[in-house]
Image (cartoon, rainbow, N blue to C red):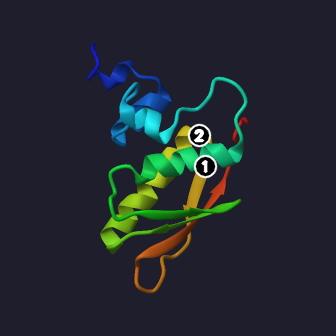
Amino acid sequence: TGPGDWFGYGRVEAVRAALGVEPGSAEASAVGIAPAGADTRVDAVARAVRVALHGVPSATADVGPRTVTLGADTAYDLGRLVSRLCTALWCEWLEGAPDTPSADGLSVEVHVSGAHPG
């Protein structure tokens, strides 16, 4: 075991580490850490979006009340971004369901659902 042993992480820490946001790192502070107490759904979605955007330089996100509109420079990066967002939402007890991408394949709306405990 040790700092590189992701088997020693909790469920959220392991997933965030797999997305490039190691526990206790500057990146973890930058994207935000879920509070031990009450939290809002909006804050949880925003935190998941920041984790998803980490490592995808061309990515953009517009966060709405029930959806997140994602954009990227290439269809490949958009696909990566959708996958990263759905994974990051899981860490917040939420789920993402993407619509069909735009005609140019560079943007998509992801519907957010789930019972965030906050």
> Which residue is located at x 45 percent, y 39 percent?
30
Q: Amino acid at mark 1?
A: Val
| Label 2 vs label 1, nearer the camera | 1
Tell me the kind of residue under disc 2.
Glu
Task: Determine which residue is flagged by label 1.
Answer: 45
Q: Residue at x 32, y 59 (%)?
A: 57
Q: Earlier in the sequence, mark 2 or mark 1?
A: 1
Residue 42, placed above or below residue 6: below
Question: Quadrant location of the N terminus?
Answer: top left
Q: Nearer the viewer, residue 73 or 114?
A: 73
Q: Residues within 10 Å of mark 2 (few under 14, many from 20)?
A: many
Q: Residue at x 31, y 68 (%)?
A: 76
Q: Residue at x 53, y 47 (%)?
A: 48
**Whole-percent x and y of residue 79?**
38, 65
| Residue 89 visible at all | no
Tell me the quadrant of the picture where the C terminus can be found.
top right
Question: Where residue 36 appears, x then y in whole percent?
Answer: 64, 23
| Quarter of the image where one finds residue 23 | top left
**Figure check: 76 above or below 46:** below
Mark 1: few/some/many CA within 10 Å (<14, 14-19, 20+): many
Query: In the figure, residue 104 lies in which quadrant?
Result: bottom left
Alpha-carbon distance for marks 2 and 1? 8 Å
Residue 50 visible in the snapshot: yes
The answer to whether the residue labelled 2 contacts the one labelled 1, judged by CB atoms less than 8 Å apart, is: yes
Q: Element under label 2?
A: loop
Residue at numbered disc 2: 92
Position of residue 35 measured from the top left corner of the image (x, y, whole percent): 62, 28
> How many circles with numbers are drawn on the protein?
2
Q: Secondary structure at mark 1?
A: helix
